[in-house]
Image (spheres, rainbow, N blue to C red):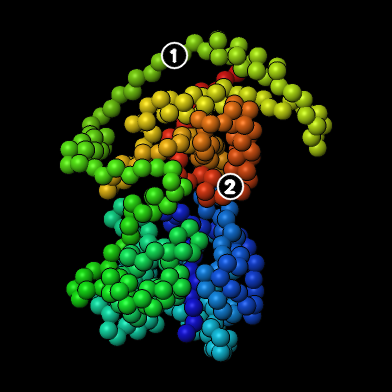
């Protein structure tokens, strides 16, 4: 059966991307883990790995195409023994029929070539949760789950970024007890995502503690959210005298050792006010642990380290690379790491783990002259 490859959601908020480059061509064989394409999102340019095995029968969306919606068919793989020309013809028919249709809600998109005989009538395409958190699964994994009547939201993914792939579904099918626990009940709608699990995956295991909410905390959060949305706000500002901080920065920069680089001999670091603010935020979070948290629907995530995100201006937007464990790093390390992040951010070369999962964000509002 042909394997449809669609535009992946490379982040929970991604809705479309630009297909910059194909690393394969029609007729090539691909295996799980092979880098098949480069896709540009609003934040970065990322490599996309194959999660299924097969032979490239048809590239539906050519390299250089912009504004490709998530879940749009971009390529079709043929499984072993299938006729490439027949699979390619099917792909052409499907892509032409899709292009003629009016846009529809993503929740209504169900591939018509999937025949589900005994599974309940449920929406089995990649969908959005009520809070816009996506359920990440490969097309083949969704197809197998549909055929076997499995609830994908109950299956743990081992693919890239926690994506559910073929072997995850096969593992469930091979275990009777596990299959029973993941099966859809008649009349039970398919859950569309597990928001808390997707958020938790952004943080390293062992670096947080999850504390469940009590009813009072949930009510407070709800009321504060309503207040922010409905009640006009005013903001208090304060002027800070930074003479002592500027003097300290000058002293530390003057003490920087000289190092040899490809560009010649230069200081090992050059501290900015922003570097010192990042360090100050990290130490503040360490001093007040109750501020170093992330809100989840099921509980409060208390972080053991202080990760500070810094908004960097890039063409047509912002991106927020994260200084991990900033409370443990020296000012020179923070400074050099931030310069590297800023350079690669403007080149759109940051990796997802370098800008996803920060606890505190810092936006530079003041220009120091």
Instruction: Give residue 350's mark.
Output: 2
* 105 on left or right of 319: left
Residue 218, position as x, y percentages in the image: 21, 41
Give the camera-side residue of 341 and 86: 341
Image height check: is 58 above or below 347? below
Residue 15, position as x, y percentages in the image: 43, 57
* 122 on left or right of 140: left
Local SS, label 1: loop
Task: Identify the residue shown where x is 39% and y is 49%.
Answer: 200
The quadrant holding residue 162 is bottom left
**Which residue bears the numbered disc 1?**
239
Instruction: Give residue 133's mark.
Output: none
Badge 2 crowding class, 10 Å Cα cut-off, few under 14, some 14 to 19, many 20 or more, is many
Question: Mark 2 against mark 1, which lies toward the viewer?
Answer: 2
Task: Identify the residue shown where x is 29% and y is 85%.
Answer: 117
Q: Say if residue 100 shows up in the picture.
A: no
Q: CA distance from mark 2 to mark 1?
A: 34 Å
Screen quadrant of the C terminus: top right
Residue 246, position as x, y percentages in the image: 58, 14
Local SS, label 2: loop
Q: How many marks?
A: 2
């Amino acid at each position: 059966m042909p394997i449809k490859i669609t535009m992946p959601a490379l982040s929970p908020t991604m809705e479309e991307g630009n297909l910059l480059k194909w690393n394969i061509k029609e007729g090539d064989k691909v295996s799980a883990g092979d880098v098949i394409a480069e896709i540009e999102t609003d934040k970065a340019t990322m490599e996309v790995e194959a999660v299924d095995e097969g032979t490239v029968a048809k590239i539906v969306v050519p390299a250089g195409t912009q504004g490709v919606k998530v879940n749009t068919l971009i390529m079709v793989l043929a499984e072993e023994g299938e006729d490439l020309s027949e699979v390619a013809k099917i792909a052409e028919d499907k892509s032409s029929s899709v292009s003629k249709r009016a846009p529809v809600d993503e929740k209504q998109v169900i591939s018509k070539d999937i025949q589900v005989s005994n599974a309940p009538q449920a929406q089995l395409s990649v969908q959005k949760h009520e809070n816009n958190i996506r359920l990440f699964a490969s097309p083949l994994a969704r197809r197998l789950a549909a055929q076997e009547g499995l609830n994908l939201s109950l299956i743990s993914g081992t693919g890239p970024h926690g994506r559910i792939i073929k072997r995850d579904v096969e593992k469930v099918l091979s275990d009777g007890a596990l299959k029973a626990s993941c099966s859809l009940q008649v009349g039970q709608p398919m859950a569309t995502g597990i928001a808390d699990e997707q958020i938790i995956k952004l943080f390293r295991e062992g670096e947080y503690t999850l504390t469940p909410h009590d009813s009072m905390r949930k009510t407070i959060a709800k009321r504060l959210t309503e207040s922010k949305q409905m009640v006009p706000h005013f903001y208090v500002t304060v002027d800070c005298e930074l003479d002592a901080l500027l003097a300290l920065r000058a002293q530390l920069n003057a003490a920087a050792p000289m190092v040899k680089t490809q560009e010649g001999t230069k200081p090992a670091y050059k501290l900015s006010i922003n570097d010192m603010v990042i360090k100050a935020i990290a130490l503040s979070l360490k001093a007040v642990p109750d501020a170093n948290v992330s809100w989840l629907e099921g509980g409060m995530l208390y972080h053991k380290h202080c990760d500070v995100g810094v908004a960097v201006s890039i063409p047509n937007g912002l991106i927020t690379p994260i200084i991990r464990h900033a409370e443990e790093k020296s000012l020179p390390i923070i400074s050099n790491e931030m310069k590297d992040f800023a350079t690669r951010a403007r080149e759109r070369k940051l990796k997802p783990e370098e800008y996803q999962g920060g606890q505190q964000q810092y936006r530079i509002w003041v220009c120091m002259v």
